[in-house]
Amino acid sequence: MYKIFIIIILIITDLLTKKLIYDSIDLNTFISILPFFDLAHIHNYGISFGLFSNQIKPWILVLISSFVTIIIIVMAINSKSIIEKWGLILIVSGAISNTIDRAINNYVLDFIYMHYKEFYWPAFNFADIYITIGFLVIFYQIIINIKKNAVT
């Protein structure tokens, strides 16, 4: 039950930060925080990194992400590995939050903008961080399983 509480807290945190950025920073504005980090207000109409922006209807993206999220929830419920289960919980939290954002606004608000000199990483948000950490946790579990199988 506490895992559902954590999912809810993560979703609320992501949506509240998006609301704070929406209310505080004008669209397509960047505020320099550190030489390599800006806060921004960007609307992502596509999928990861803005791919397929304005090429796929928002409701189709909501439908696809909802379907994928349900599959990941089933995977988390059926997982025997605690590490894998936590990775999937992080992914689900980010997926639900970004899906809610897209369902309400027809876009996902991204606001964390990292760069170094002329090299720029596409803007992202906390939900994207949850998803990335979740994948890294699962990757860690895969490496553990490979090492375990190599020893036996």
Image (cartoon, rainbow, N blue to C red):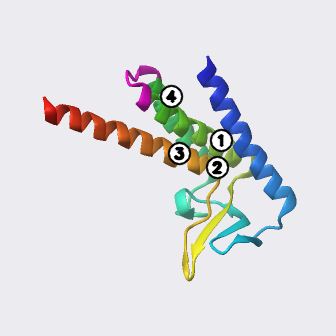
Q: Is residue 20 visible?
A: yes
Residue at figure coordinates x 55%, y 56% from the top left:
47
Mark 2 or 1: in front is: 2
Mark 3 or 1: in front is: 3
- Which residues are the magenta region? 77-84
CA distance for labels 2 and 1: 9 Å
Q: Mark 2: which amino acid? A: Phe
Residue 116 horizontal/vertical position (percent)? 56, 76
* Residue 35 magenta: no
Residue 63 horizontal/vertical position (percent)? 57, 41
Task: Say if mark 4 contacts mark 2, CB within 8 Å.
Answer: no
Mark 3 or 4: in front is: 3
Front-lying residue, 22 or 83: 83
Residue at label 2? 126
Single out the residue that lies furthest toward the left: 152
Residue at label 1? 97
Q: Is residue 97 left or right of residue 145?
A: right
Residue at label 3? 131
Q: Mark 3: which amino acid? A: Ile
Single out the residue that lies furthest toward the right: 23
> As displayed, is residue 4 above or below residue 127?
above
Neighbor class of circle 1 (other Cα within 10 Å; few <14, some 14-19, many 20+) is many
Q: Regarding mark 2 in the picture, which secondary structure is present there? A: helix
CA distance for labels 2 and 3: 9 Å
Q: Mark 4: which amino acid? A: Ile
CA distance for labels 4 and 1: 14 Å
Residue at figure coordinates x 52%, y 63% from the top left:
51
Badge 4 or badge 2: first in the primary sequence: 4
